[in-house]
Image (cartoon, coloured by chain):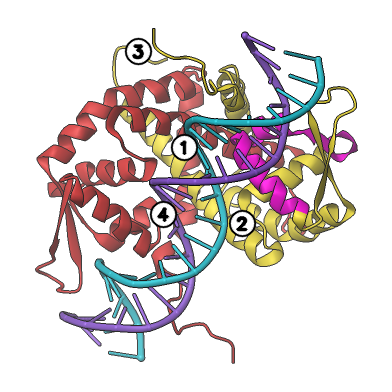
Chain colours: A red, B yellow, C cyan, D purple
Amino acid sequence: MSDPTAGLNTEQLGAYFALMEVSSLLQYAVEEHLRADGDLSWVQFQILARLVDAPEGRLRMTDLADGVVYSRSGLTYQAGLLDKRGLITRSPSPDDERSVMVTVTDAGRELVARVLPGHVAQVRGLLFEAMSDEDLAALGGVLARVRAHMRATPPRSAKPRAGRNRAG
Amino acid sequence: MSDPTAGLNTEQLGAYFALMEVSSLLQYAVEEHLRADGDLSWVQFQILARLVDAPEGRLRMTDLADGVVYSRSGLTYQAGLLDKRGLITRSPSPDDERSVMVTVTDAGRELVARVLPGHVAQVRGLLFEAMSDEDLAALGGVLARVRAHMRATPPRSAKPRAGRNRAG
DNA sequence: TATTGTTATACTCTATAACTATA
DNA sequence: TATAGTTATAGAGTATAACAATA
Protein backbone atom coordinates (compact mmCIF):
# COMPACT_ATOMS: atom_id res chain seq x y z
CA MET A 1 0.00 0.00 0.00
CA SER A 2 1.07 3.62 0.07
CA ASP A 3 2.76 5.53 2.85
CA PRO A 4 0.69 8.64 3.38
CA THR A 5 3.71 10.71 4.29
CA ALA A 6 5.75 9.89 1.21
CA GLY A 7 5.44 10.70 -2.45
CA LEU A 8 4.31 8.25 -5.06
CA ASN A 9 6.77 5.54 -5.95
CA THR A 10 7.87 4.97 -9.51
CA GLU A 11 5.27 2.33 -10.14
CA GLN A 12 2.48 4.52 -8.88
CA LEU A 13 3.63 7.51 -10.84
CA GLY A 14 3.85 5.41 -13.97
CA ALA A 15 0.37 4.01 -13.47
CA TYR A 16 -1.05 7.45 -12.79
CA PHE A 17 0.47 9.01 -15.89
CA ALA A 18 -0.46 6.03 -18.02
CA LEU A 19 -4.03 6.24 -16.82
CA MET A 20 -4.34 9.89 -17.66
CA GLU A 21 -2.61 9.52 -20.98
CA VAL A 22 -4.66 6.54 -22.07
CA SER A 23 -7.96 8.14 -21.17
CA SER A 24 -6.93 11.36 -22.82
CA LEU A 25 -5.91 9.67 -26.05
CA LEU A 26 -9.02 7.53 -26.02
CA GLN A 27 -11.34 10.43 -25.42
CA TYR A 28 -9.73 12.47 -28.12
CA ALA A 29 -10.01 9.71 -30.70
CA VAL A 30 -13.55 8.84 -29.77
CA GLU A 31 -14.66 12.45 -29.76
CA GLU A 32 -13.41 12.94 -33.26
CA HIS A 33 -15.65 10.14 -34.48
CA LEU A 34 -18.64 11.25 -32.48
CA ARG A 35 -18.35 14.67 -34.01
CA ALA A 36 -18.03 13.32 -37.51
CA ASP A 37 -20.73 10.65 -37.17
CA GLY A 38 -23.37 12.48 -35.19
CA ASP A 39 -22.14 16.02 -34.48
CA LEU A 40 -21.92 15.15 -30.82
CA SER A 41 -19.35 16.21 -28.28
CA TRP A 42 -18.10 13.76 -25.70
CA VAL A 43 -20.27 15.23 -22.96
CA GLN A 44 -23.33 15.25 -25.16
CA PHE A 45 -22.83 11.61 -26.04
CA GLN A 46 -22.41 10.76 -22.38
CA ILE A 47 -25.61 12.53 -21.48
CA LEU A 48 -27.53 10.69 -24.17
CA ALA A 49 -25.93 7.35 -23.37
CA ARG A 50 -26.81 7.67 -19.71
CA LEU A 51 -30.38 8.54 -20.55
CA VAL A 52 -30.70 5.61 -22.94
CA ASP A 53 -29.45 3.34 -20.17
CA ALA A 54 -31.74 4.81 -17.52
CA PRO A 55 -35.13 3.25 -16.74
CA GLU A 56 -37.75 4.87 -19.00
CA GLY A 57 -34.97 6.94 -20.52
CA ARG A 58 -35.24 9.68 -17.92
CA LEU A 59 -33.07 11.21 -15.22
CA ARG A 60 -33.10 14.31 -13.06
CA MET A 61 -30.78 17.12 -14.04
CA THR A 62 -28.76 16.83 -10.85
CA ASP A 63 -28.27 13.08 -11.19
CA LEU A 64 -27.19 13.62 -14.74
CA ALA A 65 -24.76 16.33 -13.70
CA ASP A 66 -23.24 14.10 -11.03
CA GLY A 67 -22.98 11.15 -13.38
CA VAL A 68 -21.29 13.09 -16.11
CA VAL A 69 -19.06 15.00 -13.68
CA TYR A 70 -20.30 18.35 -14.74
CA SER A 71 -21.40 21.63 -13.27
CA ARG A 72 -25.10 22.43 -13.15
CA SER A 73 -24.89 25.41 -15.41
CA GLY A 74 -22.77 23.46 -17.84
CA LEU A 75 -25.38 20.75 -17.97
CA THR A 76 -28.14 23.28 -18.49
CA TYR A 77 -26.19 24.63 -21.42
CA GLN A 78 -25.64 21.20 -22.96
CA ALA A 79 -29.22 20.13 -22.28
CA GLY A 80 -30.35 23.28 -24.07
CA LEU A 81 -28.37 22.27 -27.13
CA LEU A 82 -29.70 18.71 -27.11
CA ASP A 83 -33.22 19.99 -26.53
CA LYS A 84 -32.94 22.37 -29.48
CA ARG A 85 -31.94 19.42 -31.65
CA GLY A 86 -34.91 17.40 -30.46
CA LEU A 87 -32.75 14.70 -28.86
CA ILE A 88 -34.12 15.19 -25.35
CA THR A 89 -37.08 16.82 -23.67
CA ARG A 90 -37.30 18.45 -20.27
CA SER A 91 -40.29 18.59 -18.00
CA PRO A 92 -40.91 19.40 -14.34
CA SER A 93 -40.87 16.37 -12.10
CA PRO A 94 -44.23 15.41 -10.59
CA ASP A 95 -42.55 14.26 -7.35
CA ASP A 96 -40.54 17.36 -6.68
CA GLU A 97 -41.60 20.52 -8.42
CA ARG A 98 -38.06 21.88 -8.20
CA SER A 99 -36.61 19.06 -10.21
CA VAL A 100 -36.49 18.73 -13.95
CA MET A 101 -36.73 15.33 -15.60
CA VAL A 102 -34.72 14.88 -18.76
CA THR A 103 -35.97 12.29 -21.23
CA VAL A 104 -34.39 10.95 -24.42
CA THR A 105 -36.60 11.27 -27.44
CA ASP A 106 -36.84 8.65 -30.18
CA ALA A 107 -34.59 10.84 -32.28
CA GLY A 108 -32.10 10.79 -29.44
CA ARG A 109 -32.20 7.03 -29.23
CA GLU A 110 -31.79 6.75 -32.96
CA LEU A 111 -28.80 9.02 -32.95
CA VAL A 112 -27.12 7.01 -30.20
CA ALA A 113 -27.85 3.82 -32.11
CA ARG A 114 -26.42 5.29 -35.27
CA VAL A 115 -23.27 6.51 -33.60
CA LEU A 116 -22.66 3.54 -31.33
CA PRO A 117 -21.16 1.04 -33.80
CA GLY A 118 -18.38 3.38 -34.85
CA HIS A 119 -17.86 4.45 -31.30
CA VAL A 120 -17.57 0.90 -30.09
CA ALA A 121 -15.24 -0.03 -32.91
CA GLN A 122 -13.02 2.87 -31.94
CA VAL A 123 -12.88 1.81 -28.32
CA ARG A 124 -12.22 -1.79 -29.21
CA GLY A 125 -9.46 -0.90 -31.63
CA LEU A 126 -7.67 1.43 -29.27
CA LEU A 127 -8.33 -0.01 -25.86
CA PHE A 128 -9.23 -3.68 -25.98
CA GLU A 129 -7.16 -4.83 -28.88
CA ALA A 130 -4.06 -4.58 -26.75
CA MET A 131 -5.68 -6.47 -23.90
CA SER A 132 -6.07 -10.11 -22.97
CA ASP A 133 -9.11 -11.44 -21.18
CA GLU A 134 -7.15 -11.48 -17.95
CA ASP A 135 -6.10 -7.89 -18.52
CA LEU A 136 -9.70 -6.92 -18.99
CA ALA A 137 -10.84 -8.66 -15.85
CA ALA A 138 -8.06 -7.10 -13.82
CA LEU A 139 -8.58 -3.62 -15.21
CA GLY A 140 -12.33 -3.74 -14.79
CA GLY A 141 -12.05 -4.96 -11.23
CA VAL A 142 -9.59 -2.34 -10.08
CA LEU A 143 -11.34 0.51 -11.79
CA ALA A 144 -14.72 -0.41 -10.40
CA ARG A 145 -13.26 -0.40 -6.92
CA VAL A 146 -11.49 2.89 -7.48
CA ARG A 147 -14.61 4.48 -8.85
CA ALA A 148 -16.59 3.42 -5.81
CA HIS A 149 -13.89 4.87 -3.60
CA MET A 150 -13.92 8.15 -5.46
CA ARG A 151 -17.67 8.35 -5.53
CA ALA A 152 -17.67 8.07 -1.75
CA THR A 153 -16.41 11.63 -1.83
CA PRO A 154 -19.21 14.22 -2.19
CA PRO A 155 -20.19 14.67 -5.83
CA ARG A 156 -19.43 17.71 -7.81
CA SER A 157 -22.87 19.26 -7.79
CA ALA A 158 -22.65 19.39 -4.00
CA LYS A 159 -19.92 21.99 -4.21
CA PRO A 160 -20.60 25.07 -2.09
CA ARG A 161 -22.78 27.53 -3.90
CA ALA A 162 -23.12 31.27 -3.69
CA GLY A 163 -23.00 32.52 -0.15
CA ARG A 164 -21.61 29.45 1.52
CA ASN A 165 -18.12 28.79 2.70
CA ARG A 166 -17.04 32.37 3.02
CA ALA A 167 -14.20 33.37 5.29
CA GLY A 168 -14.95 34.88 8.67
CA MET B 1 -10.14 -11.26 -26.99
CA SER B 2 -12.73 -9.21 -28.81
CA ASP B 3 -14.68 -10.11 -31.92
CA PRO B 4 -14.18 -7.25 -34.34
CA THR B 5 -17.67 -7.63 -35.79
CA ALA B 6 -19.54 -7.45 -32.51
CA GLY B 7 -20.18 -4.72 -29.96
CA LEU B 8 -18.43 -4.57 -26.65
CA ASN B 9 -19.53 -7.10 -24.08
CA THR B 10 -20.75 -6.05 -20.68
CA GLU B 11 -17.37 -6.43 -19.09
CA GLN B 12 -15.69 -4.31 -21.73
CA LEU B 13 -18.33 -1.62 -21.57
CA GLY B 14 -18.02 -1.51 -17.82
CA ALA B 15 -14.25 -1.23 -17.94
CA TYR B 16 -14.44 1.47 -20.59
CA PHE B 17 -16.91 3.60 -18.66
CA ALA B 18 -15.07 3.06 -15.40
CA LEU B 19 -11.83 4.13 -17.01
CA MET B 20 -13.30 7.33 -18.35
CA GLU B 21 -15.14 8.10 -15.16
CA VAL B 22 -12.15 7.48 -12.92
CA SER B 23 -9.83 9.60 -15.01
CA SER B 24 -12.40 12.32 -15.24
CA LEU B 25 -13.01 12.44 -11.50
CA LEU B 26 -9.31 12.29 -10.81
CA GLN B 27 -8.46 15.04 -13.23
CA TYR B 28 -11.19 17.25 -11.88
CA ALA B 29 -10.07 16.83 -8.28
CA VAL B 30 -6.43 17.29 -9.09
CA GLU B 31 -7.06 20.33 -11.22
CA GLU B 32 -8.89 22.04 -8.42
CA HIS B 33 -5.85 21.71 -6.19
CA LEU B 34 -3.41 22.75 -8.87
CA ARG B 35 -5.44 25.88 -9.45
CA ALA B 36 -5.65 26.69 -5.77
CA ASP B 37 -2.02 25.83 -4.95
CA GLY B 38 -0.23 27.25 -7.94
CA ASP B 39 -2.79 28.80 -10.30
CA LEU B 40 -2.02 26.09 -12.81
CA SER B 41 -4.37 24.29 -15.15
CA TRP B 42 -4.00 20.58 -15.76
CA VAL B 43 -2.30 21.12 -19.10
CA GLN B 44 0.04 23.72 -17.71
CA PHE B 45 1.09 21.40 -14.93
CA GLN B 46 1.66 18.61 -17.41
CA ILE B 47 3.83 20.81 -19.56
CA LEU B 48 5.93 21.87 -16.59
CA ALA B 49 6.14 18.33 -15.20
CA ARG B 50 7.34 16.95 -18.50
CA LEU B 51 9.96 19.64 -18.76
CA VAL B 52 11.19 19.03 -15.24
CA ASP B 53 11.54 15.36 -16.09
CA ALA B 54 13.30 15.98 -19.37
CA PRO B 55 17.10 15.99 -19.62
CA GLU B 56 18.34 19.54 -19.00
CA GLY B 57 14.73 20.58 -18.53
CA ARG B 58 14.17 21.21 -22.20
CA LEU B 59 11.98 19.84 -24.99
CA ARG B 60 10.97 20.84 -28.48
CA MET B 61 7.52 22.33 -28.92
CA THR B 62 6.35 19.46 -31.10
CA ASP B 63 7.52 16.78 -28.71
CA LEU B 64 5.79 18.62 -25.93
CA ALA B 65 2.59 18.87 -27.94
CA ASP B 66 2.63 15.16 -28.72
CA GLY B 67 3.34 14.25 -25.13
CA VAL B 68 0.58 16.36 -23.73
CA VAL B 69 -1.87 15.39 -26.48
CA TYR B 70 -2.39 18.89 -27.63
CA SER B 71 -2.64 20.88 -30.80
CA ARG B 72 0.28 23.03 -31.85
CA SER B 73 -1.57 26.28 -31.58
CA GLY B 74 -2.95 25.28 -28.23
CA LEU B 75 0.54 24.62 -26.97
CA THR B 76 1.76 27.93 -28.31
CA TYR B 77 -1.02 29.60 -26.37
CA GLN B 78 -0.21 27.78 -23.14
CA ALA B 79 3.52 28.26 -23.59
CA GLY B 80 2.82 31.95 -24.01
CA LEU B 81 1.05 32.02 -20.67
CA LEU B 82 3.81 30.10 -18.90
CA ASP B 83 6.43 32.28 -20.55
CA LYS B 84 4.66 35.43 -19.39
CA ARG B 85 4.76 34.10 -15.85
CA GLY B 86 8.46 33.37 -16.10
CA LEU B 87 8.02 29.63 -15.65
CA ILE B 88 9.56 28.67 -18.98
CA THR B 89 11.70 30.23 -21.66
CA ARG B 90 11.69 29.63 -25.39
CA SER B 91 14.65 29.83 -27.73
CA PRO B 92 15.40 28.68 -31.26
CA SER B 93 17.08 25.30 -31.43
CA PRO B 94 20.70 25.34 -32.58
CA ASP B 95 20.25 22.02 -34.41
CA ASP B 96 17.21 22.92 -36.43
CA GLU B 97 16.46 26.57 -36.87
CA ARG B 98 12.78 25.79 -37.32
CA SER B 99 12.41 24.25 -33.91
CA VAL B 100 11.86 25.99 -30.62
CA MET B 101 13.31 24.59 -27.44
CA VAL B 102 11.25 25.12 -24.32
CA THR B 103 13.13 25.20 -21.02
CA VAL B 104 11.83 25.29 -17.46
CA THR B 105 13.16 28.16 -15.44
CA ASP B 106 14.12 27.92 -11.78
CA ALA B 107 10.84 29.57 -10.94
CA GLY B 108 9.08 26.87 -12.92
CA ARG B 109 10.89 24.15 -11.03
CA GLU B 110 10.10 25.80 -7.75
CA LEU B 111 6.44 26.03 -8.60
CA VAL B 112 6.29 22.38 -9.54
CA ALA B 113 8.06 21.48 -6.32
CA ARG B 114 5.65 23.59 -4.34
CA VAL B 115 2.58 22.10 -5.96
CA LEU B 116 3.73 18.50 -6.13
CA PRO B 117 3.16 17.38 -2.54
CA GLY B 118 -0.50 18.34 -2.56
CA HIS B 119 -0.90 16.93 -6.02
CA VAL B 120 0.62 13.63 -5.04
CA ALA B 121 -1.45 13.45 -1.88
CA GLN B 122 -4.54 13.98 -3.96
CA VAL B 123 -3.66 11.19 -6.35
CA ARG B 124 -2.77 8.84 -3.56
CA GLY B 125 -5.95 9.52 -1.66
CA LEU B 126 -8.24 9.10 -4.61
CA LEU B 127 -6.52 6.53 -6.76
CA PHE B 128 -4.11 4.38 -4.79
CA GLU B 129 -5.83 4.22 -1.46
CA ALA B 130 -8.38 1.83 -2.92
CA MET B 131 -5.70 -0.34 -4.47
CA SER B 132 -3.59 -3.24 -3.31
CA ASP B 133 -0.05 -3.80 -4.51
CA GLU B 134 -1.30 -6.46 -6.90
CA ASP B 135 -3.93 -4.08 -8.22
CA LEU B 136 -1.26 -1.51 -8.87
CA ALA B 137 0.98 -3.94 -10.68
CA ALA B 138 -1.89 -5.16 -12.81
CA LEU B 139 -3.17 -1.71 -13.63
CA GLY B 140 0.25 -0.36 -14.45
CA GLY B 141 1.04 -3.28 -16.69
CA VAL B 142 -2.14 -3.13 -18.71
CA LEU B 143 -2.12 0.60 -19.09
CA ALA B 144 1.48 0.68 -20.22
CA ARG B 145 0.67 -1.85 -22.90
CA VAL B 146 -2.43 0.02 -23.98
CA ARG B 147 -0.57 3.28 -24.15
CA ALA B 148 2.07 1.75 -26.36
CA HIS B 149 -0.64 0.38 -28.60
CA MET B 150 -2.33 3.75 -28.86
CA ARG B 151 0.90 5.57 -29.43
CA ALA B 152 1.54 3.32 -32.40
CA THR B 153 -1.16 5.37 -34.09
CA PRO B 154 0.20 8.61 -35.58
CA PRO B 155 0.41 11.35 -32.96
CA ARG B 156 -1.88 14.27 -32.91
CA SER B 157 0.50 16.88 -34.21
CA ALA B 158 0.82 14.81 -37.40
CA LYS B 159 -2.79 15.51 -38.26
CA PRO B 160 -3.22 16.76 -41.82
CA ARG B 161 -2.65 20.45 -42.05
CA ALA B 162 -3.98 23.03 -44.43
CA GLY B 163 -3.98 21.75 -47.98
CA ARG B 164 -3.40 18.09 -47.28
CA ASN B 165 -5.83 15.23 -47.45
CA ARG B 166 -8.35 16.80 -49.70
CA ALA B 167 -10.82 14.69 -51.65
CA GLY B 168 -10.09 13.91 -55.28
C1' DT C 1 -32.95 28.09 5.11
C1' DA C 2 -31.54 24.56 1.70
C1' DT C 3 -32.13 22.64 -2.78
C1' DT C 4 -33.11 22.58 -7.90
C1' DG C 5 -32.44 24.60 -12.02
C1' DT C 6 -31.82 28.69 -15.20
C1' DT C 7 -29.71 32.79 -16.86
C1' DA C 8 -26.32 36.48 -17.75
C1' DT C 9 -21.87 37.36 -18.15
C1' DA C 10 -17.19 37.03 -18.56
C1' DC C 11 -13.53 34.29 -19.49
C1' DT C 12 -10.63 30.33 -20.90
C1' DC C 13 -9.57 27.30 -24.02
C1' DT C 14 -9.29 25.15 -28.58
C1' DA C 15 -9.22 24.64 -33.44
C1' DT C 16 -8.73 26.26 -38.18
C1' DA C 17 -6.47 28.52 -41.54
C1' DA C 18 -3.20 31.71 -43.09
C1' DC C 19 1.44 33.02 -42.61
C1' DT C 20 6.69 33.03 -41.98
C1' DA C 21 10.88 30.68 -41.97
C1' DT C 22 13.87 26.83 -42.35
C1' DA C 23 15.07 21.92 -44.32
C1' DT D 1 7.51 20.57 -51.05
C1' DA D 2 7.37 19.37 -46.14
C1' DT D 3 8.05 20.67 -41.43
C1' DA D 4 8.16 23.88 -37.11
C1' DG D 5 5.98 27.32 -35.00
C1' DT D 6 3.09 31.66 -34.50
C1' DT D 7 -0.90 34.43 -35.06
C1' DA D 8 -5.62 35.98 -35.85
C1' DT D 9 -9.99 34.88 -35.42
C1' DA D 10 -13.89 32.76 -34.31
C1' DG D 11 -16.45 29.59 -31.74
C1' DA D 12 -17.33 26.21 -28.08
C1' DG D 13 -17.34 25.33 -23.53
C1' DT D 14 -17.12 26.51 -18.51
C1' DA D 15 -17.67 28.72 -14.20
C1' DT D 16 -19.49 32.24 -11.14
C1' DA D 17 -22.90 34.72 -9.25
C1' DA D 18 -27.45 36.27 -9.13
C1' DC D 19 -32.02 34.80 -9.57
C1' DA D 20 -36.71 32.40 -9.08
C1' DA D 21 -39.22 28.68 -7.32
C1' DT D 22 -40.14 24.85 -4.41
C1' DA D 23 -39.20 21.93 -0.02
Q: Which mark is residue A141?
A: 1
User: In 3D space, how far apart are the residues under numbered discs 4 and 1 (Cα atoms)?
Assistant: 21 Å
Q: Is residue B33 visible?
A: yes
User: In 3D space, how far apart are the residues under numbered discs 3 and 4 (Cα atoms)?
Assistant: 31 Å
The local crowd at label 3, few if under 14, some if 14 to 19, many if 20 or more residues have their Cα within 10 Å, is: few
Q: Residue at 48% across / 41% down in the picture?
A: A143
- Which residue occupies the foreground of this view, B157 or B68? B157
Q: Which mark is residue B125?
A: 2
Is A94 rendered above or below residue A3?
Answer: below
Q: Chain of mark 3?
A: B
Q: Are marks 2 and 1 on the same chain?
A: no
Q: Chain of mark 2?
A: B
Q: Is residue D17 left or right of residue A52?
A: right
Q: Are marks 4 and 1 on the same chain?
A: yes
Question: Do callouts 3 and 4 mark residues in contact (Cβ within 8 Å)?
Answer: no
- Which residue occupies the foreground of this view, B108 or B8? B108
The local crowd at label 4, few if under 14, some if 14 to 19, many if 20 or more residues have their Cα within 10 Å, is: some
**Magenta stretch containing residue B75, yes or no?**
yes
Provide the residue designation for mark 3: B3
User: In 3D space, how far apart are the residues under numbered discs 3 and 2 (Cα atoms)?
Assistant: 37 Å
Q: Which is nearer the N-term, disc 4 or disc 1?
A: 4
Q: Which mark is residue B108?
A: none
Label 2: element kind: helix
* In this view, the mark in front (4 or 1): 4
Provide the residue designation for mark 4: A69
